[in-house]
Image: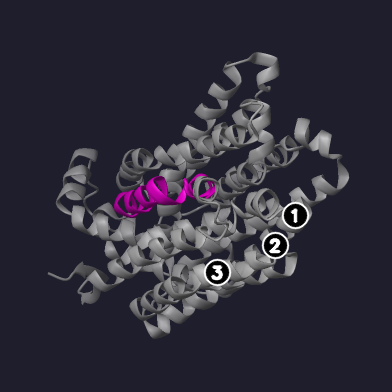
Amino acid sequence: MTGVSTKASAFRAIVRVASGNFLEMYDFMVFGYYAAAIGQAFFPSTNGYASLMSSLMTFGAGFLMRPLGAVILGAYADRHGRRAGLLLTLSLMSIGILSIACTPGYAAIGLLAPLLVLVGRLLQGFSAGMELGGVSVYLAEIAPPGRKGFFVSWQSASQQVAVMVAALAGVAVTATLSPDAMQSWGWRVPLLLGCLIIPFLFVLRRSLPETQAFTSRRHHPGTAEILRSLRSNWRVVLVGALLVVMTTVSFYMITAYTPTYGSAVLHLSSQDSLLVTLCVAASNLVWLPIMGAASDKLGRRPLLIACTLAMMLTAYPVLSWMIAAPSFARLLAAELWLSFLYASYNGAMVVFLTELMPVAVRTCGFSLAYSLATAIFGGFTPAICTYLIHTTGNRAIPGLWLCCAAACGLAAALVARQREEPAGDAVTLMR
């Protein structure tokens, strides 16, 4: 199908394709929210900082597998179909979340515990390497003319639903259990809840039709051909990765890192930090489709440039204002501003990235660009921020990390320019 004719069928298509994306982000967020408790369970130490850093580095290690997953699974999707690729990634993600939720702690099985958790995270990262690209490309290929930005924005919007559900589960569990119970086993409850919805997600994804953009192509390249095409388009992949840097750094900063930042750095209650995260996710959910639709009307590049400049000018001052008198209200206000900039940028960026890639290697190229940025910058953002604060003593220094990410996005937005091709929208690099 080239587009979706009714609002009802559009909604069904978006829900079915974005369902697995929800599971991936839900699991990632739960791990980030309970990084301290997971660290004590699998990486116990008398030094709280060492335990937390071990947990956060394990969180980031999963992202190192994303580029490999992007190439291997992305090539599979470009060869065998978008639907087949999405079903495969959901299967791998399910194994990963089950392994982390059910692995006994270090006290029970020793070194095998952190090893199994690390393997689970690596498997999740491998599957996630293609998941975002597969969902984005599928939504772009089923979108009606002139509505690509709105449709593709729901890839990121589904992630916000996952952040909200994870935060709500965290608030409920934290309010129900004692701090000792949370530290001991309570952090597993949200992970097990995620496991319960896996069969339902498989039912949804199995009902996905293949896109007409894929089925109408007479030639589907093999893995070797796809790799050759990626090699010849390395500049496009590099620019795409730079575009993603601001998205991935800001997203993990305002979602996965917020509970740890609020409680461990600002010394607010865990409940307050999770409530802020919940509000941030709700803000993202509102702004992403709005700004995706705005990019259809105003163009992608103007929004990308405006948002990166705004982030560079305001991120550090906003965080400096917040730490001057830490409070729930100030943390919420700062995070909502960063949320607006993230969602406005990402609403235009993701569809722009699908238009950047040649159609024959669209899933693989998109996934590789996204995964490289996430592996190098985004996934390690919680660990990097924790390290920078620890070494400098400056609790606002994550704002400078955001400024650097925004500079990458601005440079890429200025280098890439859009042009019309006979087959549709495309992006080429300015020589």
Report x, y in % for residue 180.
Answer: 82, 34
Q: Secondary structure at mark 2?
A: helix
Task: Tell me the chief SS of the magenta region.
Answer: helix
Q: Could you tell me if residue 88 is visible in this image?
A: no
**Closest to the observer: 136 or 336?**
336
Q: Secondary structure at mark 3?
A: helix
Which residue is tagged 2? 276
**Closest to the observer: 395 or 160?**
395
Q: CA distance from mark 3 to mark 2?
A: 12 Å
Q: Earlier in the sequence, mark 3 or mark 1?
A: 1
Number of the label disc, if any, that sits on residue 212:
none
Q: Is residue 13 left or right of residue 37?
A: left
Q: Which residues are magenta?
A: 363-386
**Closest to the observer: 406 or 167?**
406
Which dot, 3 or 1, sits closer to the camera? 3
Q: Residue furthest left?
A: 431
Q: CA distance from mark 2 to mark 1?
A: 11 Å
Q: Earlier in the sequence, mark 3 or mark 2?
A: 2
Q: Earlier in the sequence, mark 2 or mark 1?
A: 1
Which residue is tagged 3? 338
- Within 10 Å of the Cα at label 2, are there few (<14), some (14-19), or many (20+) other Cα atoms? many
Q: Is residue 204 left or right of residue 235?
A: right
Which residue is tagged 1? 168
Inspect the image, locate mark 3, and give the three-letter code of the amino acid beneath it: Leu
Inspect the image, locate mark 1, and give the three-letter code of the amino acid beneath it: Leu
- Within 10 Å of the Cα at label 3, are there few (<14), some (14-19), or many (20+) other Cα atoms? many
Q: Is residue 218 left or right of residue 122?
A: left
